[in-house]
Amino acid sequence: MTNLVVIDLGSNSVRMQISQIDDYGGYTIIGYFREYVRLSEKMGKEMILKEEPMKRTIQALKDFKARYTQYDHVVVKAVATAAVRGAKNQAEFLKRVKDEVGLDLQVISGSTEAYLDYVGVVNTLPIRNGIIMDCGGASTELVWVQNGACKERISIPIGSVVLSQNYNLADSISASDLYRAMNAAGQKISTVRWLGQVHNLPLIALGGSNRTIAKIHRRKVTDDVDELPDIHGMHLPPHYIFNLVSKLIVMNKDERMKIPGLAKNRADVIIGGLIPISLVLRNLQISEVIFSNCGLRDGILFEYLRQSRKE
């Protein structure tokens, strides 16, 4: 029996998933934990991780370690994505994590992040053709799935925290700031040439901002927390998302914080987080949106299981 601990350090949050793997390769997820650390806060154009976000993150990693060290036969796979990937003081931060937590963080490339998203999705949803979109705090991953295979993949440097902080989208939003943010995101997305070849396919949406759409929707379906429909595999039409984004844009931060299904600590970055999916839906004439609760962390799990079977 192995307890596989997967830690995913993003720009907005750090998450840990613990899976118990039996001797036959079967697995059960026995723990899932999340802390909002906002690691990319105030990185700015100089791309330097600031002291307070680093301290918050290190403390969260210490708390995670206190949990997983209670188990026997632990294997830890810890990865860092866009915020650490782009930080000029990356080496300093990684050393602090090693010295203070005793954890070796692997900084993965955007291409690897996109591939792991793909692995997590296609092993848990019956997707043969579509576009996978993972919008995080500082990057957005796009994957073209054709006949079940990963045909193209890319990571682009736009995300909920970056867009919200750079274009003043945290509270009340002006038309000029929104216009500038959408232009900036649109320019980045337009550099992905293969997107011109894909239209009228389903979009598989993951990442905290995208999943918030599904969380808001299911709270409209029922107020009974025990009866909430599962996000994983939920289908919604594009026009529902356009209407929701339109309503959120005219609200201020306090008003967004009161929306059932929208986490209070995401209210200041949700508009920046929904700009990428809005642009992709509009430009690619997406047929439907399918939400996935599985992505990078599950991709690491399935890759670990695949490697174990080969040994």
Image (cartoon, rainbow, N blue to C red):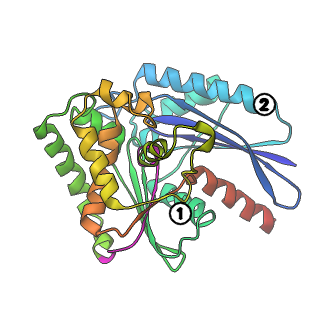
Observer-nearest of 121 and 310: 121
Residue 175, horizontal then vertical, whole percent: 12, 39
Residue 162, horizontal then vertical, whole percent: 31, 38
Observer-nearest of 3 and 228: 228
Identify the residue at horizontal 20%, vertical 56% (top origin).
187
Reply yes or no: does residue 5 show up in magenta: no
Question: Which badge, 1 or 2, comes first in the chain's sequence?
Answer: 2
Q: Which mark is residue 268?
A: none
108 is higher (above) or lower (below) than 40: below
| Three-letter code for the amino acid on which mark 2 is drawn | Thr
Residue 177, horizontal then vertical, whole percent: 15, 38
Identify the residue at horizontal 57%, vertical 50% (top origin).
229
Observer-nearest of 104 and 162: 162
Could you tell whether 88 is left or right of 193 in the image? Answer: right
Which residues are the magenta region?
A: 197-212
Identify the residue at horizontal 53%, vertical 63% (top origin).
118
Residue 288, picture quadrant: bottom left
Quarter of the figure with the C terminus: bottom right
Q: According to the image, label 1 marks what residue?
A: 118
User: Is residue 277 in view?
Assistant: no
Observer-nearest of 252 and 115: 252
Residue 260, picture quadrant: top left
| Three-letter code for the amino acid on which mark 1 is drawn | Tyr
Could you tell whether 51 is left or right of 196 in the image? Answer: right
The local crowd at label 2, few if under 14, some if 14 to 19, many if 20 or more residues have their Cα within 10 Å, is: few
Q: According to the image, label 2 marks what residue?
A: 69
The local crowd at label 1, few if under 14, some if 14 to 19, many if 20 or more residues have their Cα within 10 Å, is: many
